[in-house]
Image (cartoon, coloured by chain):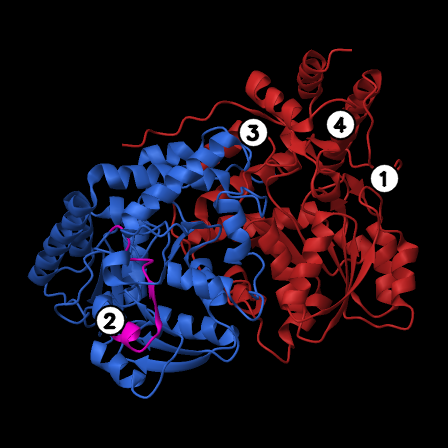
Chain colours: A blue, B red
Amino acid sequence: MIAQFNPPQRLLLGPGPSMVPQSVLDAMGLPLLGHLDPLFVGLMEEVKGMLRTVFQTTNPMTFPVSGTGSAGMEFCFVNLIEPGDEVVIGINGVFGGRMAEVAERCGATVIRVEAEWGRIIEPEQIAQALRGRSPKLVAVVHAETSTGVLTPVQEIAQIAHNAGALMLIDTVTSLGGVPVCIDEWGIDAAYSGTQKCLSCPPGLAPVTLSSRAMEVATNRRTKVQSWYLDVNLLNGYWGSDRAYHHTAPISMNYALHEALRLTLEEGLESRWLRHQENHLLLAAKLEEMEMTLTAQAGHRLPQLNSVAVPAGYDDAEIRRRLLNDFNIEIGAGLGPLKGKTMRIGLMGESSSAENVGRLVGALKAILPA
Amino acid sequence: MIAQFNPPQRLLLGPGPSMVPQSVLDAMGLPLLGHLDPLFVGLMEEVKGMLRTVFQTTNPMTFPVSGTGSAGMEFCFVNLIEPGDEVVIGINGVFGGRMAEVAERCGATVIRVEAEWGRIIEPEQIAQALRGRSPKLVAVVHAETSTGVLTPVQEIAQIAHNAGALMLIDTVTSLGGVPVCIDEWGIDAAYSGTQKCLSCPPGLAPVTLSSRAMEVATNRRTKVQSWYLDVNLLNGYWGSDRAYHHTAPISMNYALHEALRLTLEEGLESRWLRHQENHLLLAAKLEEMEMTLTAQAGHRLPQLNSVAVPAGYDDAEIRRRLLNDFNIEIGAGLGPLKGKTMRIGLMGESSSAENVGRLVGALKAILPA
């Protein structure tokens, strides 16, 4: 007979999931309601409202997709793209590459605008790619989780709109950690995840679509290739009809409700400031240890710190010791950065001076000066 | 400021979610691990193993898709179907219709084999549809949640295989409540949900693919249209490579682990028997009240009981009173059965003599003789 699972208390300082406040864990243990129960419908409305505040948008079509962040990515592409559409995608890490892959599976012609991993997508690169083109969509990763850089999406959105394109951004790692201003920046579509700076367990993907994006999604020539992610059907459930579409993950929505509540209780600006302060603290400590942050200076994410693996060390061994001897998780480098960088997440609840101290103490024990 | 959510304790006797045991709710509150943590990987292996036992299969490719039951349906179709493939689908309720819709969005040519809602798909109907045809796939709903009938899928699988087709079944409502024998019956693909007879919250979709199905999925001419649901990529994460694909819903997997553990602790046969006994108890009580079960006699699901709305009553009013005055949820009729039937679920933890007693008591108060 298999025993009950009894995980240790890890300090999660990787690229997500981040630490989850106790009241969010407690929310998942609340008694279940049916997915059409008027009280659950009330919760859905509050979740939508709080997501709008966090995304800084008035978009009615703002809700959590019943899947993880990558399902949110797929939601945006399957609804906005039809076979033959042209899409310009910025690729400076894993998630830009994933967007291109997803777009191609929707039949898009993808124009790739690439930057070295660890550097931003320069607005000028997008402007150049758009010369003589009028693609349907420009898509860029706001906060690249694989490298730790923050691309200036507001400028890019302006350039995209001037070319008549919709603007899509990946905010999986940015939402709740740095400013995400959907309406002010003119973003037409964005997706996120719950397990990063919102500090909720993984399992839902907050998304938002502007009225322009909704117009595109509702006036397609072809049906959306995914039934599960078709916004025209989802609108029946998350909109005012409350028509049954699928059974929403009830407990995960309880958790997101509580996580959003705590986010707004702290206040977005205080939360961004806290992320910034703990990032600066970590950066100072790492500098003392002669460890180098690798993301482009001036564009570093406070919530995801890519650090060069110290010369002479095996990053897998460092991570293994952190996990086994100190119960601390950090992330590996991905793709071309595998073995070269490690990723330290200070996301949501994980972002505290105490946690920086614990990590630095452990690193000092593992990497003696 | 929005208040913490504080749902009442409902008795869930609808078409799912069902009641969830306390230890499953508690499991979701356990501390999070990273999705690549060796301890989480160990849990994934245990979940896969227990799912194999519950599905009664040795299929290596047996795991929970990170979405709800409908994502499991889409997983099966997107991986097995390519544009132009012919598919025979049995339609005797909502979920057969949904399969046809999903298959068409994959570019399939769908041959619909229809039966009146509330009746089974007769094996002979499938045999007839297959005459002179060799479709790639035959798909049937094992337990139709919208009507409460159990279709004899074993016979149909035999017929499908004789025609050279793969056999796919929807086991969303059957798994854990009535026998599901993937290997013995020769089923090539099946999907389920967690929130029915497994009594776990909604959010994951257990699936299983036979080696024949895997051969089809891995030797496609075209890429799987969904990146999120591509089994070739998912195999990298849930298989032995442990390559990052997406962030699994950690807490939901904790819950499923505990729900499967409890299911196997009870034993599959005891569990099926319990569902059958409480169904017979409910049926006897309803008969005393002159209420009629509407699904085809001899093929009724013990876990989902469709009942005719008593003459002179408004079903919405009955359901509203059950919910508001007695904290009991039952389901409405769907599609052509809307307003004509109500659906009483006795699924998993919800299936008990005590719950039957509570419901019957409430119905007697609402529908005086």
Kind of residue at disc 1: His
The quarter of the picture where residue B90 lies is: bottom right
Label whose residue precedes the other's in the sequence (1 or 4): 1
Residues under labels 3 and 4: Cα distance?
31 Å
Residue indicated by mark 4: B309
Q: Give the residue at mark 2.
A: A158
Measured as percent of width and height from the top left, residue A215 is found at 44, 63
Task: From the image, tell me which residue sits under label 1.
Answer: B299
**Looking at the image, do the residues carrying marks 2 and 1 touch, with CB atoms under 8 Å apart?**
no
Magenta span covers which residues?
A158-176
Name the residue tied to disc 3.
B21
Q: Secondary structure at mark 2?
A: helix
How far across and how far down the image is residue A125, in percent? 24, 82
1 and 3 marks on the same chain: yes
The residue shown at (88%, 35%) is B297
| Pointer 1 chain | B
Amino acid identity at mark 2:
Gln
Q: Chain of mark 4?
A: B
- Asked if labels 2 and 4 share a chain, the reply is no
